[in-house]
Image: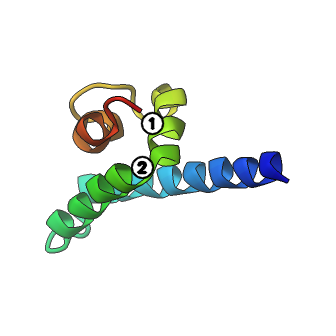
Amino acid sequence: MAEQLAGRAEATAHRILDHFAHLRYQMGTQAFTSERADWEAYMRRSFADSLILCRALRDDQEAFGGAGPDSLWGRYADEPCRGT
C-alpha cells in the first residue's frame, strides 16, 4: 500500500512539473503577463511546500531545462529545495 501511494505521489509530482513547464512556455510567449508574478510565486511556494515535488524535479532536472538560472530549478526550486 505504501509503495502504491508513493508511486501515485511521484506521478502527480511529474504532472505538476509538466504543468509548470507549460506555464513557463506560455509566459515566454507573453501569455499571463498580468498574472505572471502570481504564477511565479505559486510555483516557488509549491516547491517550498512539497518535498516530493523537489525530489521529482531533482531526479529529472534535464527533462525540465536543467539547473541553469532560467530553468524550473534555477528560477523556482533551487532555494526552497536545498537540503531535500
Badge 2 is on which residue?
21
Secondary element type, mark 1: helix
Quarter of the rendering containing residue 68: top left
Q: Residue at x 45, y 36 (%)?
A: 64
> What crowding class fits label 2: few (fewer than 14 Cα within 10 Å), some (14-19), or many (20 or more)?
some
| Image point (31%, 31%), residue name | 82
Quadrant for residue 30, please give it. Answer: bottom left
Label whose residue precedes the other's in the sequence (1 or 2): 2
Q: In the rendered structure, which amino acid carries the disc numbered 2?
A: Ala
**Colouring method of the image:** rainbow
Residue 57 position in % (x across, y down): 47, 37
Apparent side of residue 31 relative to residue 55 in the rendered image (left or right): left
Mark 1 touching mark 2, by CB under 8 A?
yes
| Residue displayed at 26% across by 58% down | 27
Farthest residue to the bottom: give it. 34
Q: Indicate the quadrant containing the N terminus: top left, top right, bottom left or bottom right.
A: bottom right
Tell me the amino acid under the disc marked 1. Phe
Residue behind mark 1: 64
Q: How would you rate the neighbour count of disc 1 (Cα within 10 Å): few for under 14, some for 14-19, many for 20 or more?
A: some
Asked whether residue 25 appears in the rendered view, the answer is no
Q: Where's residue 71, x and y in %? A: 31, 35
Give the number of marks.
2
